[in-house]
Amino acid sequence: MSTEQHIKKLRDELNQHNYNYYVLDNATISDFEFDKKLQELQELERLHPEFFDANSPTQRVGGEVTKNFETVPHNHRMYSLDNSYSKEDVLDWEARLKKIVDGPVHYTCELKYDGASISLTYEKGVLVKAITRGDGFQGDNVTANVKTIKSVPLQLKGDFPEKFDIRGEIVLPFEGFNKMNEERIEIGEEPYRNPRNTASGSLKLQDSAEVAKRPLECLLYSITGSNLGINTQFESLEKARTWGFKVPRAAKLVHSIAEVFEFIDYWNSHRHSLPYETDGVVIKVNSLRQQEELGHTAKAPRWAIAYKFKAEQVSTLLNSISYQVGRTGAITPVANLEPVELAGTTVKRASLHNADQIEKLDIRVGDAVYVEKGGEIIPKILGVDLSRRPSNSQPTQYITHCPECATQLVRVAGEAQHYCPNYNGCKPQIIGRIQHFISRKAMDIEGLGGETVALLVNVGLIDNYSDLYELTKEQVVPLERMAEKSADNLIQGIQQSKNIPFERVLYALGIRYVGETVAKKLAKHYKSIAAIAEASVSDLVNVDEIGIKIAESVLDFFSSEENMLIINRLRDFGLQLEISEEQRMGQTDKLNGQSIVVSGVFESLTRDELKKLIEDNGGKVSSSISSKTSFIVAGDAMGPSKKKKAEDLGINIINEYQFLQKIK
């Protein structure tokens, strides 16, 4: 086999594995094996640039930077859909259809996913262009970014047409969205507001490598072009699926409006179980010949209509607005509401996000406001019932000074939130930083909880986290609800935290934008806090996953004289501020690229020790079993449902001793 043939064979194999995993959700190869093949292909392509292919699986990682997105015309116009909000609207639509077309009309019912619309152009089975919806006539060329989305096929298979466009939605599944927000909250950033806007914003990121890190998916639903050899909408969905596209299985061919209503009723009650945001059902005339006959209005096709689900919404009074100060100094305005039942829970508070949002909606104390559970999860205020606004109502004046320490607030250009700059003198920031320092993923100080931290600060025993290491039993015993045994446990927990490894100490410091993953990257790269403190912005951005914003934040932290005094105290108290020789010796790549689940109770190791061994050997610890799981390390009392899921997916289960042998 020639080198060119070998490269082609590897590309075909990797494309098939990508399709199995991201489209069929049925992995046929482990992550480790996939990565080995990918690495082999990358090396061959490096040695033989004459065989470069822009659609090679190696190009999925991104790296292309687009400063300005080119605006290009669509091959075929992207129309909007007419919306309906009642079954009567749908019946009226059907009556209009029957006046135009003869014979029976059948319908394809599809879920309306709430994402960013996209049009993909394929020529000879190869993705050549990806264009955002724009104004329907033209959109932005985001091909480099869309190529990083694993469920978008770069090379089709089967009996595809010579050239066609296929439309769909770029979506962000709830699981990935929630994980992204957990990481943002962890590093002190405001969480993304909803999956749809986050997915849309992802397409316009300048660095495609950043897009590649986001768990975006592409759900396809409409093919346009000439001489396609397709007769119906439902057939087009089935065909697209065989060519390699991710087409939702919920779509259904029905033969009457009564069946359409059955589909609507079913998904109105079952939509909450879906992994993506959906806000309705799209009903299309199935026959493409009838679609052509029906044609379009100026804005929308006559042969399709969107039935929008009703979001649960209530009206209640806004009693007051309070302002919370986070550990990073970020100010979050909170609406305090007259308690109201919404989606099965009593809602008393809702985030107002920032000053811009308050101004945009003109929200005022005393207003009757409309509250909805955004994504059925987080309460949000949609607007104000102006007909009920009191005559003496006054516009909301956003606070100018910190509600806790009275320091004048600042707002950095380009950021939505106001901040209190009194880093070392604002009590909620001090308490928040210490609470973060002692948290489970950081120093994990047993016997010390958030309430106790607040108490210690309020009575003047500590002012920063280095003060913890000077606490004595005699000082804490007199505190409220602090018995002698509790005091012993607290002091002992503080002393034991001196053994916590460097990367967790670095995370515990609470440097803005430095979450667990970034802390590990910095620790692994620099090996000591002294080396990080001396690094310049240009040095820092060369570290994997470190961008300019993180680099500047790290530099700001270590430029502070007060922070350096605290770090020097931590060093004097014996905390681990560099990677130990033992750690350096114990790190390997034996589990590189593998996702591993730990479940059950173990004999020779704790769960945390097992997880650390996995990470020290290059593996990734996952909390849930999926088709991505490489293997499971199981002890006694592994959950039966987990075991069954592993067996159903064909995932290997090993015990702790087999695992230790594997990494020996």
Image: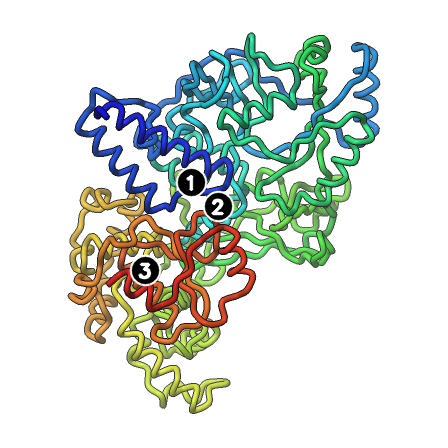
- Residue 391 in view of the camera: no
Residue 229, image quadrant: top right
Three-letter residue code for mark 2: Gly
Residue 288 sits above or below residue 255 on the image: above
Residue 488 sits above or below residue 639 on the image: below
Three-letter residue code for mark 3: Ile
Viewer-proximal residue, 169 or 190? 169
Measured as percent of width and height from the top left, residue 48 is found at: 19, 25
Residue 531 sits above or below residue 192 on the image: below
Residue carrying label 2: 176
The answer to whether residue 626 is left or right of residue 516 is right
Q: Which of marks 3 and 1 is in front?
A: 3
Q: Which is more N-terminal, label 1 or label 3?
A: 1
The Cα–Cα distance between marks 1 and 2, rounded to whole angstroms, is 8 Å
* Quadrant of the image containing the C terminus: bottom left
Do the numbered discs 3 and 2 sit on residues whose CB atoms are within 8 Å?
no
Regarding mark 1 in the picture, which secondary structure is present there? loop
